[in-house]
């Protein structure tokens, strides 16, 4: 760079010296004063031309040097461009890596969500979650099966629009429940028992975002409890009645013997009194016999029985001569059960006799039969006087009756027979209007 500057400086000095020398020679060569000025001016012009030429030469050299310098700057620009491209390439690689990590995270989240959903759908307990607006957010398959609802259709609806009492009241209570038991009628008209636990649903920050209900079907457990309780009561009753009936029959035999002796010696006007004593002894003996029969264990001779056929035979036998009573049987599809045919007919006979006696002036009896979820359901509904709510809990007690004539073993015997078959008996009634007895037995097929 310094060498090029030195050459340019020397060239300018040389051009100036040559121009000055030529101008002096021209001035000295001309004698006239006028010509001196002319020649001086020409010398100056000549020097100017030389200076301009020198400047052009210098400018040309500068361009050449600039051209050379431009190559260096170009290489620097090229380096910057190459570096920029390298950075962009690395950024592209990082972007691809981020996209890959994002896809992996999303796939993992989907897998976890699917896994959690599989767990939720696989648990045997029913699970329902709602948000703070009591809108249902999730219902698993077990909940739909237990409650008899379409799980998918329930999502997005209000909880109290889908479920009736007593479940609907759970969302209005400010407290959670733990292992509470509720009787509930499902959408498919099944009477079930539910064991429910509810808790607050919270997010990661601990904020309440809704409620979650976990419940199990306790219907079979309740039926088993009824069987165990009934067996215990019958066992206690059997032990008690065996001793009491033995003592009573001994005394009754003595009284009956004396009554027969009196009937032979008493005057005709008093013979009716002795006959009345004999009649009452006979009634007491019948009560004791029925008590002993009720208290002793039931041995079942099971066979496959078509419930529809047993119903039709029993209806014809009980209500055949009752012209004022209309009987309707809704049993389109045959339902089979594994049962003792004789005992099953006895239980149904007791139900129909009670229904007929509840309608002394006539009425109607409707019998419905259906199979559902491995169960056989039979409902006997009459339009009689109904049962007061105050005595509803006593109707299955042995020897409890509101009739002037009767022992009070009809419904107790029905319960014993059905429970011994692994079934349940429920009674609903509206006083003065109707009574419905629902029997559920394990179905076959």
Image (cartoon, helix red, strand yellow):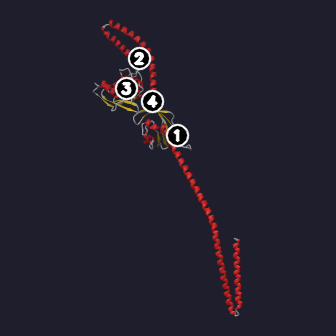
* Residue 283 x, y percent position in the rendering: 36, 15
Q: Is residue 280 left or right of residue 156?
A: left
In which quadrant will I find the N terminus?
bottom right
In the drawing, what numbered circle is on residue 304?
3
Counting from the top left corner in percent of width and height, residue 163 is at 43, 38
Q: CA distance from mark 1 to mark 3?
A: 49 Å
User: Of marks 4 and 1, which one's residue comes earlier in the chain?
Assistant: 1
Tell me the distance, in whole angstroms, between the alpha carbons under discs 1 and 2. Answer: 54 Å
**Label pair 1/3, CB-CB below 8 angstroms:** no
List the residue tagged with mark 1.
200
Q: Secondary structure at mark 4?
A: helix
368 and 241: which is toward the camera: 368
Q: Quadrant of residue 145?
A: top left
What percent of the width, then of the height, locates residue 220? 45, 29
Please name which of the two marks, 2 or 4, marks the residue nearer to the observer.
4
According to the picture, the residue beneath numbered tag 4 turns out to be 220
Q: Residue at x 70, y 76 (%)?
A: 9
């Amino acid at each position: 760079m310094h060498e090029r500057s030195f050459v340019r400086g020397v060239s300018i000095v040389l051009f100036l010296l040559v121009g000055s020398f030529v101008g002096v020679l021209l001035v000295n060569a001309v004698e006239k004063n006028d010509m001196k000025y002319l020649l001086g001016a020409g010398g100056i012009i000549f020097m100017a031309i030389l200076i301009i030429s020198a400047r052009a030469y210098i400018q040309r050299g500068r361009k050449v040097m600039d051209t050379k310098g431009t190559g260096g700057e170009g290489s620097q620009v090229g380096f910057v461009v190459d570096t920029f491209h390298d950075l962009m390439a690395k950024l592209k690689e990082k972007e691809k890596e981020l996209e890959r990590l994002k896809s992996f995270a999303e796939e993992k989240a989907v897998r976890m969500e699917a896994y959690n959903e599989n767990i939720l759908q696989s648990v045997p307990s029913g699970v329902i979650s709602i948000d703070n607006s009591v809108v249902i957010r999730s219902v698993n398959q077990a909940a739909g099966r237990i409650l008899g609802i379409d799980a998918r259709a329930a999502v997005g609806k209000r909880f109290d629009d889908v479920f009736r009492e007593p479940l609907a009241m759970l969302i209005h209570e400010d407290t959670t429940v733990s292992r509470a038991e509720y009787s509930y009628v499902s959408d498919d008209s099944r009477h079930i028992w539910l064991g429910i636990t509810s808790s607050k649903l919270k997010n990661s920050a601990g904020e309440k975002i809704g409620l979650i209900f976990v419940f199990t079907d306790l219907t079979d457990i309740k039926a088993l409890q009824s069987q165990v309780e009934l067996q215990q009561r019958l066992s206690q009753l059997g032990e008690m009645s065996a001793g009491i009936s033995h003592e009573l029959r001994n005394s009754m035999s003595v009284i009956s013997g004396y009554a027969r002796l009196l009937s032979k010696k008493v005057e005709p006007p008093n013979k009716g009194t002795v006959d009345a004593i004999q009649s009452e002894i006979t009634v007491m003996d019948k009560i004791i016999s029925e008590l002993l029969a009720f208290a002793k264990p039931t041995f079942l001779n099971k066979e496959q029985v078509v419930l529809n056929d047993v119903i039709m035979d029993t209806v014809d036998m009980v209500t055949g001569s009752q012209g004022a009573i209309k009987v309707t049987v809704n049993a389109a599809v045959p339902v089979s059960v594994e049962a003792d045919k004789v005992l099953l007919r006895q239980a149904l006979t007791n139900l129909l006799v009670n229904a007929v006696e509840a309608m002394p002036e006539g009425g109607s009896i409707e019998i419905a039969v259906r199979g559902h979820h491995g169960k056989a359901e039979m409902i006997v509904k009459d339009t009689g006087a109904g049962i007061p709510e105050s005595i509803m809990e006593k109707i299955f007690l042995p020897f409890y009756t509101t009739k002037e004539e009767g022992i009070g073993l009809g419904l107790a015997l029905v319960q014993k027979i059905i429970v011994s078959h692994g079934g349940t008996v429920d009674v609903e009634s509206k006083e003065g209007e109707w009574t419905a007895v629902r029997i559920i037995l394990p179905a076959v097929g």
